[in-house]
Amino acid sequence: MALGAIEWVVIILIILLLFGAKKIPELARGIGQGINEFRKASSEIRKEIEKGAEDVKEVPRKKDDATLQ
C-alpha cells in the first residue's frame, strides 16, 4: 500500500506542527547518526562471523578424532 502525494503532504505538515521547523534538522541528524551506527555494528558483526568461519576452516582435524567414529 503506497502513500500518495496528498498523504505525504499531510504527514509532513503534522511533523512540522509537532516538532517545529527548528527541530526537524536535529531529528534528521539524529536519525542519520543512528543509521550510521547500525551499519557500523552490522558490518563489524559480519566481519566477526567471517573471521570465525575462516578460523574453523584453518583448524586441522585428526583422522582418529572420536567425533568421526
Image: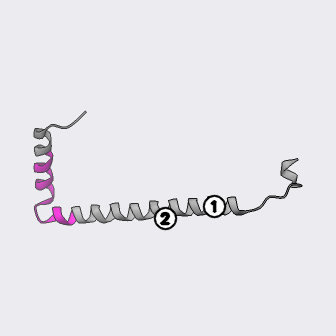
The answer to whether residue 52 is left or right of residue 1 is right
Characterize the magenta stretch by its predominant secondary structure.
helix
Pointer 1 local density, CA inside 10 Å: few below 14, some 14–19, many at least 20: few
The answer to whether residue 36 is left or right of residue 41 is left
Residue 54 badge: 1
Q: CA distance from mark 2 to mark 1?
A: 15 Å
Q: Are marks 2 and 1 in contact (CB under 8 Å)?
A: no
Residue 22: quarter of image: bottom left
Magenta-tinted stretch: 11-27
**Residue 26 at x, y percent in the picture:** 20, 66
Pointer 2 local density, CA inside 10 Å: few below 14, some 14–19, many at least 20: few
In the image, is residue 35 part of the stretch drawn in magenta?
Answer: no
Which residue is under mark 2? 44
The kind of residue on which mark 1 rests is: Glu
Q: Nearer the viewer, residue 53 or 44?
A: 53
**Residue 65 at x, y percent in the picture:** 86, 55
Residue 49: quarter of image: bottom right
